Amino acid sequence: MAISRRQFLARTGLASGSLLLPSWLANPFVRSAWAAATGKSVVVIHLNGGNDALNTVTPIDDGAGTLRTDYELNRNNLRLPAGGLLPIGSDANTGAQLGLNPALSGVKALFDLGKCAIVQGCGYPEARLSHDGSNQVWRTGYPVNSAPSPNGWVGNSLIELGYLGTDIPAVNIGANIAPSFRQAVTNVLAFESLDDFGFPYDPDHPTDDAAKRACFAAQCNEATLAGQPQLSYFGSTGNSALLATEAFVESYLNDRATWASQYGGLGSAAAHDLREVAKVMYGVSLGVPGMETRYFQVSVGGFDTHSNQGAGDPGGRHYELLKSFGDAVQLFYDDCADMGIVDDTLILVWSDFGRRVKQNGNGTDHGTLGPVFLFGGSVIGGLYGNHPDISPAGLDPQGNMAYSQAPANPYRPTDFRDVYGTVLARWLCLPEATILSQILPPEPIGFDPNAYWVDGNHNFNLGFIA
């Protein structure tokens, strides 16, 4: 049975002022109960391949700087006309007006609603320009020259939230477990379509379905009661997965057929995957027994636009990628709102890296800084951080936007770990001491002196959580 946070506090006798102290988190049963009581969900969307940041959030004018001028100098046939951009306000540093790619009308609608936060210029020091290298940093939350973590930042969060071996707190839409979710303590399900994830019945012999299901359930029950930890683990998780997948599919398709058809109408992989997330979230909201699945991963591929990227015209490669993402997110947000769960849902969107400031011909090469998008009913929408410096003086020797936390730098970027830290501290209510010691450890002594993380000057309250 689902319980509210207030009911949880009353039953455990914990005073509200003690909730962020590490002492109560030492008890894994208390932590697991707290995770269930908060009812908060996190949906992570990876724009896989490295999204072109400059053609996503684009200067409309110069303001007090030279952003639009520098943009036009570096983009020729990939340039987005200023008049076609979707205005979202001014850059805090330069005062330049900024706009979204015209493909992102869905994102613009949520931005205007005040439910989309755009954190500009996110990155990390000593940027890696390979997909594998940069993704390792983003997925683990570890800087490049620290000892790599075998776990992902979400995976470590699941451990610290106290989920146990028999829990299924997370689902990845895809064939494999996303590296961000990896850990060895609790369960993460991975499937491409929930309809096909249930018991593998034989479509040629449907009359055998009931007997096969009963046999599987009996084996799971027997394993659960066997008294051997490993058998018990497989038995309990197998039975939970069987019951949950059946309930998720039937509940959503029976009760929300109109919404399901709208995802199908978009006809994109992003829409399909977010519909699968919606199925699970709806089942959880109905109180499906044994399931507290609240952490999700979706990957939207195709963003490695070295060639044939296109500009702002419908039909262009980058335009279509952004449109499929933006339209799917808007529909998913509206679906969650209609379910009554949008205030407890946070959507975090990241990409491998940005792209090179200067186009390479008809595409863009691997770059550095880029925006992180956050959506949700409890998100305080708006522009956060500074637009990166794209002037010749602001680029590194490879022509990429530079990461510098020097106090005198008016274009100071946002360290991506501050975005994660804000989610962990302000959304999931994990203590900052736990975040820094177990999830986002500081750099070792001797790291780049311009990386303010080494001095502990992190900021886990960027302001986008209500």
Image (cartoon, grey):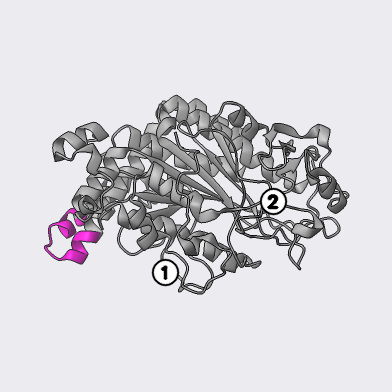
Expressed as whole percent of the image width and height from the top left, the position of residue 448 reads: 57, 69
Alpha-carbon span between mark 1 and mark 2: 31 Å
Expressed as whole percent of the image width and height from the top left, the position of residue 261 reads: 54, 30
Residue type, numbered disc 1: Pro
Q: Quadrant of the C terminus?
A: top left
The residue at 30%/62% (across/down) is 185
Q: Residue 449 has which mark?
A: none
Looking at this rendering, what residue extends furthest in the front direction? 408
- The foreground one among 68 and 268 is 68
Residue occupied by mark 2:
388
The residue at 68%/36% (across/down) is 104
Give the residues drawn in magenta, as a range: 219-233
Q: Nearer the viewer, mark 1 or mark 2?
A: 2
- The foreground one among 372 and 364 is 372
Category of crowding for the residue at label 2, using alpha-carbon neighbours closer than 10 angstroms: few (below 14), some (14–19), many (at least 20): many
Residue 228 magenta-highlighted: yes
Helix, strand or loop at label 2? It is loop
Q: Is residue 212 left or right of residue 428?
A: left
The residue at 19%/51% (across/down) is 29
- The answer to whether the residue labelled 1 contacts the one labelled 2, judged by CB atoms less than 8 Å apart, is no
The residue at 20%/37% (across/down) is 8
